[in-house]
Structures are given as structure tokens and as C-alpha cells.
Amino acid sequence: MSDKPWQDAILVTDLERGWVTRVTVGRRPVAVYDTPSGLYASLALCNHGGADLCDGYFDGHVIECPLHQGAFDVRDGKPVAAPATRPMRVLKLRVRDGMVQVRF
């Protein structure tokens, strides 16, 4: 069990349906993905080139970096297209009383 606290990110009703929504939690940019199988979250900046993943193309469970077109599975962070080779950092996510919360 983690001792890190859950932090409010965004109301579920404020999410872009079927898309990725950029939010700031504390001072960290976070991407929240509304997928066919539920909500997922990651750090918003690509670990390959530092681009904002929220500006990339999102399709189902895959986010493509707008800078180099490397792609990641948002469910587990695994790279699915070059030049991305390292997993992106995914965050734990839950919904409480209509609020999306994340844990770093």
C-alpha cells in the first residue's frame, strides 16, 4: 500500500469524451485518457522528446507523441511504436464522488 496521497485532477464531467485531457496536478502536467475500457492517466510529457502527449493523436488505447510519432499504450505505458523504447510513466487513477484522482 502506498503512503502517497490521492490528489484531485479533474471532474469526470469535464473530461473530453473519448479523448485525452491535459490537467495540472500540483505542479505536474498530467494526461487523463478516456478509453473504451475506462480512464487512465500518465505524466503528460513524452519521455523521449519532452513533447506534450496531449497534443498527440489518441486512438482507443494508444497515444502518439506529436514530436516523433513514438506511441504508447496508455493502460500500462509500454511503447508500441518507435522511436519510443522506454515505457511512459502511468499513474494510479480512481474516481471518487465524480472527481478523477491520481497518485504519483
Image (cartoon, grey):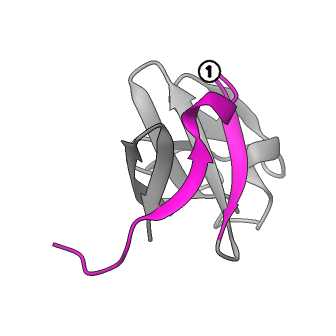
Could you say where residue 74 lies in the image, as x and y percent from the top left? 49, 42
Q: Which stretch is magenta?
A: 1-25
Task: Report the side of 70 relative to 80 (left or right).
Answer: right
- Identified at 46% across, 59% down, the residue is 102
The front one of 95 and 73 is 95
Q: Amino acid at mark 1?
A: Gly
Q: Is residue 97 left or right of residue 69?
A: left
Q: Quadrant of the C terminus?
A: bottom left
Q: Where's the N terminus, which quadrant?
A: bottom left
Q: Label 1: state its secondary structure.
A: loop
18 and 101: which one is in front? Answer: 101
Q: Is residue 14 magenta?
A: yes
Q: Is residue 9 above or below residue 29?
A: above
Residue at left offset 54%, top offset 22%: 60
Instruction: Please indicate, yes or no, whether residue 15 appears anywhere in the rendered image.
Output: no
Q: Position of residue 88 (x, y in %)?
A: 52, 60
Residue under the point 70% across and 28% down: 16
| Image location of residue 72, percent across then percent down | 54, 45
> Is residue 57 depicted above or below 22 in this figure?
above
Compared across the picture, whether 31 is left or right of 97 comes to right
Per the image, the residue denoted by label 1 is 18
In percent of width and height, residue 77 lies at 45, 51
User: Magenta includes 10?
Assistant: yes
Q: Count up the numbered dots.
A: 1
* Disc 1 residue crowd, few under 14, some 14–19, many 20+, Cα 10 Å: some
At a point 62% along the width and 21% down the height, the residue shown is: 18
- Front position in the image: 51 or 81: 51
